[in-house]
Image: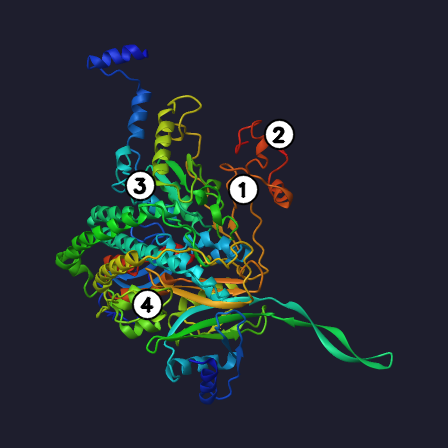
Amino acid sequence: MNLEEIKSQIEANVSGCRLEIIPNGSPSGQHSLLVDVDHGFAVATFLRDGATPRFDFCSNVTGIDWPVKEVSTKTKVKKLVDGVEKEVDEVVKTQTGGYLEAVYHLYSVEQREGPVVLRMRTEDRAERVHVPSLTPIWRSAEFQEREAYDLFGILFDGHPDLRRLLMWEGFEDYPMRRDYVDPDDYEYEPTAHDDVLKRAQAHRPAQEGGL
Amino acid sequence: MSILTDASVDTISRDETDHLTGDLLEISMGPQHPSTHGVFRMNVTLDGEQVVKLKPVFGYLHRNHEKIAETESYLGCMPYTDRLDYICSITNNWAYALAVETLAGIKVPERAEYLRVITGELTRLQNHAGLIGFLMQDMGASGTPLMYAFREREKVLDLFEALTGARMMCNYMRFGGCRCDLPAGWLDGAKKVVEGFPRFLDEFESLLKTNEILMARTQGVGIVTKAQAINAGLSGPMARASGVDYDLRKVDKYGIYERFSFRVPLGEIGDVYDRYMLRVLEMRESIEILKQAIRDLPEGPIMDPGTKIRGFRPKAGEAYGRIEGPKGELGFYLISDGSPNPYRYRVRPPTLINLTLLEDMCLGHNVADIVIILGSIDIVLGEVDR
Amino acid sequence: MDEQLKSELRRQGVVATSLQELYNWGRKSSVWPLNFGLACCAIEMIAATMARYDLARFGAEVFRPSPRQADLMIVAGTVTKKMAPQVVRLYNQMPEPKYVISMGACAISGGPFKQGYNVLKGIDRYIPVDVYIPGCPPRPEALIDAFMMLQRKIDAQYLTGPGRPRHLDAETPSEFVVPEFGAHDLVPTSNSEVWSVPLVNISNAGKNEPGRD
């Protein structure tokens, strides 16, 4: 089972979809398929019903937070220096990230194939965090999408019951995001030093005998 | 009591002129309840004794394992995996080690693979034995069958303690092999346990086959069809009881499972009775695998010499590794960005996903059946909530 | 009373004792725990009640499912912030005299999960604890040792005077405030009547009792 084959099957059957293969740098060889948000539902329906092999088992659904990161790459550019054309190193700064991602691992039980990794990205990490829900297609996504909403804040449109799963209902933060700050709570540390000591002392009012 | 005028409840017909029809009763089972196998809560809506709606509530044991893993090194996460499904700690370790080995392309030597199979199948034995004991207790047998099950479990835990130093939190696997080799006499002890196990299984199987109360309470209760099971992502004994022929030891062929000859039992109807009989049959197959593995155990190193244990930095990329745990498909999804800590560490919990169909299975049954259906799913809250 | 006289009378078939001894002996020999296991330590607690490490021979004959009928709450496992109000509510529902054993590293101080947004860093922030058992998980023998320590503690209690137990003292409270769910954390984060921030530098521990002001 080749990811390129699957990609061409989907492109032939779902019109207008934009797919991209994201290569995987590790020796595992599990490359993923990035699907655009508008056609995510149609692509998933095709994968479950019409593709060869049919992917009837959605094994894992999760969210990932990619905050904005500056990446600087060095490129060689031809420039005019003192009237002579030379190759000079130029540092180009680009920004990657700035979105939340929902990742689905799909397997085929009848043909014993897999995995196919499907990814969908939101537009930003603040307001425009909508992604279509694949729960009507694979029921196994029900609780896992609720968890991704609870911990990351990704809103799944079309989910039958989108509420928090693990945290309590009045909770307001999205804890798994990379910029989440824990509430300041005293933690016992037997040999505290440096800023752990400073934080612990701030919790304890000044008292004679103590530090 | 709360009077519900929920328009979505259209499964019962309510005659407006019949004043004897009562109101619906909403109760909350848990989080502290003798039968919920941990801190699990279900908001159940009842019409008399029959279940009309059931909504599970999770999160009472959410220990943010995934967030902690982002600040720990890869090796430092290994003891935390013990505490996920705390009854079968060795298979959790194995799943994580397999995921990291898939991520970094590490090979495992022969002897280590055999040791993994032996300890993994022993874990499966003690998990299923404890589960059947808990079933009997849920049905009201007040603890005596549980004592017999725990007696067998203690024998296996003694073996683990001699090998790894701990009864429950074994922390046994490493990336590229196992932590420590067998002490002298361990293999003979294991052979004795494996040979004595079928007698215990015969006792319990006779209970399942001839006890009228058990059969009447479990047959026809909590049925899941094959198509429902695949679509809802069920795995492990729950899916196989519904007829889905998908055992990762035969499908993915991870480790050296290809070398052992064992069968995969399948159920037909998918009710609670099927799930319990299936687990007894799986225990018998595990004993077969154990006999073959103990017989064929080779000599050799137990760790891959080329892998660094400390300062382990895999290349940037991602991997999803999964094994057939005693509860289902336990998978780990790891994303690495080249640093010593994982960027994203995700546990695919089989028990949380097996709970997807809890409401469908319980509708129309009595309150007492909820307890038995929940018991047959075999949940462990450490894994559901992580 | 003179010990020699006591044993002499004993040999004659006469048992002489004081009301305090008799009262405490009855109390310590029939402590019934509440069926309350949260996480991994619960499995070791169940193993401690099974045939190998029988806890019933120490008086913990049955584990009661209802808090109204239990004397002892063994908090076995991690207490999360979502679960904390239920734990305190259950404690309030137990009738006096009641005791708490905090089993495992997680119930003492958060344990291996202490750097967590949902983990309560020790159940002693909201309810008073009598015995702490370290370990992750502690062996069943450690639980039996803690149980015996609790029995010794009950045995040594005076029935009158300032050190008397809570159920004989009308002034001390036996119900504690139940925390509520806030937007980011529990409200209040700890109960100051029961817990105060422990000493930071343990080398100063000799000057005043560690952990208490």
- Dot 2 corresponds to which residue? A209
3 or 4: mark nearer the eye: 4
**For this view, does A193 lie left or right of residue C180?**
right
Residue B222's x, y, as percent?
A: 25, 65
**For this view, does B32 lie left or right of residue C111?**
left
Quadrant housing the N terminus of chain B:
bottom left
- Dot 1 corresponds to which residue? A188
Chain assignment, label 4: B
Above/below status of A185 relative to A172: above
**For this view, does C133 lie left or right of residue C203?**
left
Query: Tag 3's secondary structure?
Result: helix
Q: Are marks 1 and 3 on the same chain?
A: no
Q: Nearer the viewer, residue B8 or B358?
A: B358
Residue neighbourhood size for the residue with mark 4, other residues' Cα within 10 Å, grouped as few (<14), some (14–19), many (≥20): few
- Dot 3 corresponds to which residue? C48
Give the Cα distance between marks 2 and 3.
42 Å
Residue neighbourhood size for the residue with mark 3, other residues' Cα within 10 Å, grouped as few (<14), some (14–19), many (≥20): many
Q: Nearer the viewer, residue B26 or A55?
A: A55
Give the Cα distance between marks 3 and 4.
39 Å
Colour convention of the picture: rainbow
Earlier in the chain: of badge 2 and badge 1, it is 1
